[in-house]
Amino acid sequence: MARLIILARHGSVRQVNLAGPITTIGRSHSNNVCIDSDRVSRHHAAIQWTGEHYILTDMGSRNGTYVNRERVRAHELTNGDVILVGDCQLRFLCNRRVDVPVDALRLMPAADEFLQLVPSR
């Protein structure tokens, strides 16, 4: 599961789990991640899950969106990336473990059956 660790300018720290296909970031309370700062646009950025990657997109913000100190319009996020939105720092953390669909697990043989299929040395 992906999450953001949010370090606000006044020293507060909070964690937000990214749930759903799009997570919006901005000063407006209509965003999934609301940041109370005049340097953050009302609708500053969004993080979208494409099914394979998380993509951060700047939404035309006044002060820009930065990843690892580089200004970006769109950027594929990787574990540990530091995102700067206004004067707020966010750390993107993602466990890259692939979740297997429940139906796929039903197709796997039971552990005992599998061990019988493996040739002994």
Image (spheres, helix red, strand yellow):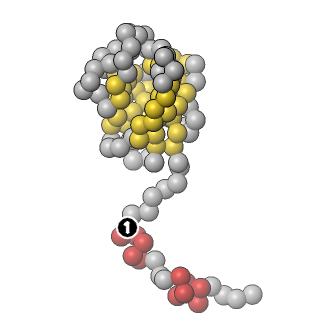
In this rendering, is residue 98 above or below 11?
A: below
- How crowded pointer 1 is (Cα within 10 Å; few <14, some 14-19, many 20+) is rated as few
Q: For residue 37, what is the image quadrant?
A: top left
The quadrant of the picture occupied by the C terminus is bottom right
Tell which of 115 and 11 is nearer to you. 11
* Residue bearing mark 1: 102
* Residue 54 in sight from this viewpoint: no
Tell me which residue sits at (47%, 21%) in the image.
Answer: 8
Q: Disc 1 residue type?
A: Val
Tell which of 32 and 67 is nearer to you. 32
In this rendering, is residue 86 above or below 100?
A: above
**Residue 75 x %, y %:** 48, 29
Task: Say how many tags the image has.
Answer: 1
Tell which of 109 and 23 is nearer to you. 23
* Residue 67 in sight from this viewpoint: yes
**Residue 56 x %, y %:** 43, 30
- Left/right placement of residue 1 relative to residue 120 reads left
Q: Name the secondary structure under disc 1.
A: helix
Most extreme residue toward the right, as rendered?
121
Tell me which residue sits at (24%, 26%) in the image.
Answer: 30
Q: For residue 46, what is the image quadrant?
A: top left
Tell me which residue sits at (49%, 33%) in the image.
Answer: 5
Tell which of 5 and 84 is nearer to you. 5
Tell me which residue sits at (41%, 10%) in the image.
Answer: 39
**Residue 106 x %, y %:** 39, 76
**Residue 26 x %, y %:** 34, 21
